[in-house]
């Protein structure tokens, strides 16, 4: 157990250092992060008067901005360089894939709502399970290049195997993003919240992608061998 903990912490250290290096060299990564956070924090309020149409636009805008974030993240890891001028085309890179995945997840949530909403504890449990087991879907779309059906199946398998290593840094860095937004002037619903929280979000997405690569291209036994070889 002690060896596994040490190996996992060493992996977090490698991933964190690499993510920090990429973010420092590619400040443009914060541009799509700002856009995504602006949509998340302000989009619903701005589009609410449009009713159902506003809700549709809000969802599409979220997926488009997430596509840009994933594009910049994967490009930074692959080539080591991204430019803010490339953010426009990045909106469409993974848009159709994300919409397909989102549609399937929405369908599962709708089924859970119809089946279990009269039993709140069970409904809450099922919704959490859906969110947990499909948590790696963005990386499977951008790095794995899988279609919607394959993504959901692969995410379920990935989380089932690697949930212990996957969630600690994800939860901590997600809290960092939310914390940065809360302390921003005007709070999370202010226009500056996205700017303040964007570096934390860009770092989170880099860590997620790099950690995904580490976990899917190595094994626990391989990380133990690396530790023994370094002695």
Image (tube, helix red, strand yellow):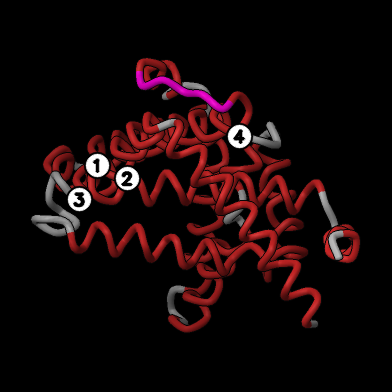
Tell me the element at label 2.
helix
Percent across and percent down for residue 99 are: 50, 35
Q: Residues within 10 Å of mark 3 (few under 14, many from 20)?
A: many
For the magenta stretch, what is the residue range?
Answer: 80-84
Marks 2 and 4: CB-CB under 8 Å? Answer: no
The one of 18 and 207 positioned closer to us in this rendering: 18
Vertical position of residue 32 compared to residue 116: above or below: above
Vertical position of residue 3 compared to residue 167: above or below: below
Locate the N terminus by quadrant: bottom right
Q: Where, by quadrant of the figure, is residue 118 drawn?
A: bottom left
Tell whether 178 sits left or right of 201: left
Report, in whole angstroms, how far the alpha carbon at label 3 lies from the one at label 1. Answer: 8 Å
The one of 1 and 109 positioned closer to us in this rendering: 1
Marks 1 and 2: CB-CB under 8 Å? Answer: no
Residue 193, numbered circle: 3
Q: Is residue 81 within the magenta segment?
A: yes
Tell me the element at label 1.
helix
| Residue at the front extreme of this rendering | 231
Say which residue label 1 marks.
38
Q: Residues within 10 Å of mark 4 (few under 14, many from 20)?
A: many
N-term-proximal mark, 3 vs 1: 1
Residue 198, numbered circle: 2
N-term-proximal mark, 4 vs 3: 4
Say which residue label 4 marks.
142
Locate the C terminus by quadrant: bottom right
Report, in whole angstroms, how far the alpha carbon at label 4 lies from the one at label 3. Answer: 26 Å
Tell me the element at label 4.
helix
Q: Is residue 105 within the magenta segment?
A: no
Report, in whole angstroms, how far the alpha carbon at label 1 lies from the one at label 2. Answer: 10 Å
The residue positioned 37% from the left and 18% from the top of the image is 88
Q: Where, by quadrant of the figure, is residue 25 drawn?
A: top left
């Amino acid at each position: 157990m002690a060896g596994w903990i040490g190996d996992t912490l060493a992996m977090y250290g490698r991933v964190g250092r690499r993510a920090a290096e990429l973010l420092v060299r590619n400040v443009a990564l914060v541009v799509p992060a700002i856009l995504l956070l602006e949509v998340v924090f302000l989009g619903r309020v701005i589009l609410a008067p449009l009713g159902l149409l506003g809700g549709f636009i809000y969802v599409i805008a979220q997926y488009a901005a997430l596509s840009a974030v994933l594009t910049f993240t994967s490009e930074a890891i692959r080539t080591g360089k991204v430019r803010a001028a490339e953010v426009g085309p990045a909106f469409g890179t993974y848009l159709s894939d994300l919409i397909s995945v989102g549609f399937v997840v929405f369908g599962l949530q709708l089924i859970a709502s119809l089946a279990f909403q009269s039993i709140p504890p069970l409904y809450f449990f099922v919704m959490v399970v859906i969110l947990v087991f499909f948590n790696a879907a963005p990386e499977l779309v951008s790095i794995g290049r899988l279609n919607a059906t394959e993504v959901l199946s692969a995410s379920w398998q990935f989380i089932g195997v690697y949930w212990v290593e996957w969630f600690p840094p994800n939860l901590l860095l997600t809290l960092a993003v939310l914390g940065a937004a809360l302390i921003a002037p005007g709070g999370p619903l202010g226009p500056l919240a996205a700017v303040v929280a964007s570096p934390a979000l860009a770092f989170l997405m880099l860590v997620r992608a790099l950690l995904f690569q580490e976990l899917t291209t190595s094994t626990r036994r391989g990380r133990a061998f690396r530790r023994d070889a370094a002695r």
